[in-house]
Amino acid sequence: MKKNIILLTLLMAIAVAFSSCGDGQKKKTQEIEGETVTIEHHLGSTVVPKNPKRVVALDFSAIENLDYIGVKPVAVPKTNMPSYLAKIQNDTSIENVGTVMEVDLEKINAVKPDLIIIGHRLADMYDQLSAIAPVISASVIDYGDFLGAFKKNLDDLGNIFDKKEEYDRAYEKIEDKISKVKTKVEADGGKGLILLHNRGRFSAYGSGSRFGVIHDVLGVEEAEKNLDTHRHGSPVSSEYVQKVNPDIIFIVDRSLVVNKEVLDKESVENLLIKQTNASKHGRIVYLNPEMWYLAGGGITSMNAMIDEVDQVF
């Protein structure tokens, strides 16, 4: 008899828990009042309120794109924020919720957002964040179609905030820039190699990679084809770079933005690197790692990246 009572009590507790969960989901749906838009992204499908007032932006590129239309988020990750976003970082009315890789869920919940925008670095926290508010991912994960993914992110924000015309104009200007750079690149004919530098070590990137915009969008021919498209690239040595002998070397220095280490060019441009055509013709290019490594998918950073490659030609 006693066992039956315990079992009955347990079953009742489970039923209450499921009932509460259902009520919570119903309440969450009811909280989205007024017009909505459904955003399809690589982590799912999310119903978002039109013109949300309290946006938490957890991706630097998304912050750029919101700032472009004058939308100020209520919370952002301010740790290691790029210097070009200083006005956001220094705004004390915007809550600091950590980094683009690790955020404070309690702080995010406290600001009562009605939309959360994340990047690829927080994909594993999608479910946890979705329990707080609707979440969309603004990652440019399809590097093989970088411009298509970039345009989709702008279109999504345009639909959410009724700013499609503004974003379309920004995209058209970027397309025009790209066309002009590609003309210069084609005339030049130089082959390039992209290297990520991190504490004395190199990783190489090519077409279809996170830095592949140089090849896939701007048309710079690869000095070495079929490199790994993994986010961490293909680990390579100075001997490898010397053997490939690129005409142009593009370097993204991770150590500078992550570890705050000042780049030692003499160490990077060692005797083997100096034997390359790139070194002999003064075409070792140090790209802005804030744009290329920390962001790279926003209107501001995209324009800056195109300009940096343009200056090479």
Image (spheres, rainbow, N blue to C red):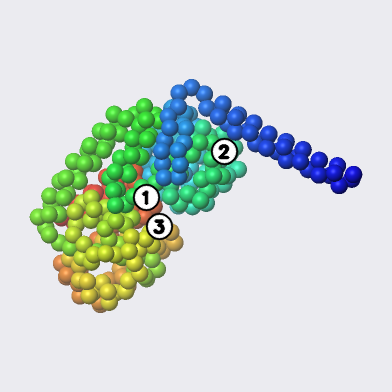
Looking at the rendering, in which quadrant would you find the N terminus?
Answer: top right
Left or right of 4 in this view: 37: left
Q: Residues within 10 Å of mark 3 (few under 14, many from 20)?
A: some
Where in the figure is residue 207, as x and y percent of width and height?
26, 58
* 89 is higher (above) or lower (below) than 25: below
| Mark 1 element type | loop
Q: Residue reaching furthest right?
A: 1
Left or right of 183 in this view: 252: right
Residue that badge 1 annotates: 141
Q: Amino acid at mark 1?
A: Ile
Q: Which mark is residue 257?
A: 3
Where in the figure is residue 30, as x and y percent of width and height?
56, 26
| Mark 2 element type | loop
Q: CA distance from mark 2 to mark 3?
A: 30 Å
Residue that badge 2 annotates: 132
Labels 2, 3: front one? 2
Looking at the rendering, in which quadrant would you find the C terminus?
Answer: bottom left
Where in the figure is residue 90, as x and y percent of width and height?
46, 42
